Image (cartoon, grey):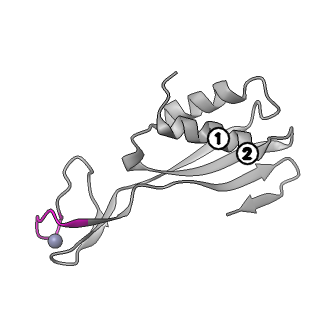
Amino acid sequence: MSRSPCLRWVLRLMDRLKPTAALRRVQVVVGVLRRVTPESLSFAYEALTRDTLAAGSLLDIKVEPFTVLCRDCGWQGQIDDAVPLCAGCGAGKLQTLKGMELFLAGLEVEDNETAEK
Ligand SMILES: [Zn+2]
């Protein structure tokens, strides 16, 4: 299992949550620039929780696309992070608006009580 910063973050998160048997779903938001696939994160989560009270709970991952603001023309939108150029004017002076997220968005427990962020 790879030990990316994201996986270490999930480890710390699970440690802080002190999961109970009622835990059904953990919702996280991960920016695309974190370079982690939902598949690998889910796989790691399953392995981490296997022998814990959180076993069987789901890691629900929302991937936030790379969204930028062009400092030259003011264009704002999603671009491919492999080609960090403004889609409006082609300049490279971009401000990252989204794509670096890594946070807990919510928890779902057995009795349908959902704790939103
Ligand atoms: Zn531009």
Q: Is residue 77 above or below residue 19?
A: below
Residue at image x 50%, y 30%?
40
Residue 100 placement: quadrant: bottom left
Q: Is residue 78 above or below residue 13?
A: below
In which of the image's four quarters is ligand 1 placed?
bottom left
Q: Position of residue 117 (x, y in %)?
A: 67, 63
Q: Which residue is mark 2?
A: 16
Q: Is residue 23 above or below residue 56?
A: below
Q: Position of residue 39 (x, y in %)?
A: 51, 33
Which residue type carries mark 2?
A: Arg
Which residue type carries mark 1?
A: Arg
Task: Assess disc 2: are there few (<14), some (14-19) or many (≥20) residues with their C-alpha within 10 Å of its C-alpha.
Answer: few
Badge 1 vs badge 2, beta-carbon distance below 8 Å? yes
Magenta stretch prevailing secondary structure = loop
**Relative horizontal placement of residue 46, taking residue 54 as reference (left or right):** left
**Relative horizontal placement of residue 5, taking residue 97 as reference (left or right):** right
SS assignment at label 2: helix
Q: Position of residue 55 (x, y in %)?
A: 77, 30
Q: Which residue is mark 1?
A: 12
Instruction: Please provide the residue range marked out in magenta.
Output: 86-94
Q: Position of residue 43 (x, y in %)?
A: 57, 28
SS assignment at label 1: helix
Q: Which is more toward the observer, 83 or 4?
A: 4
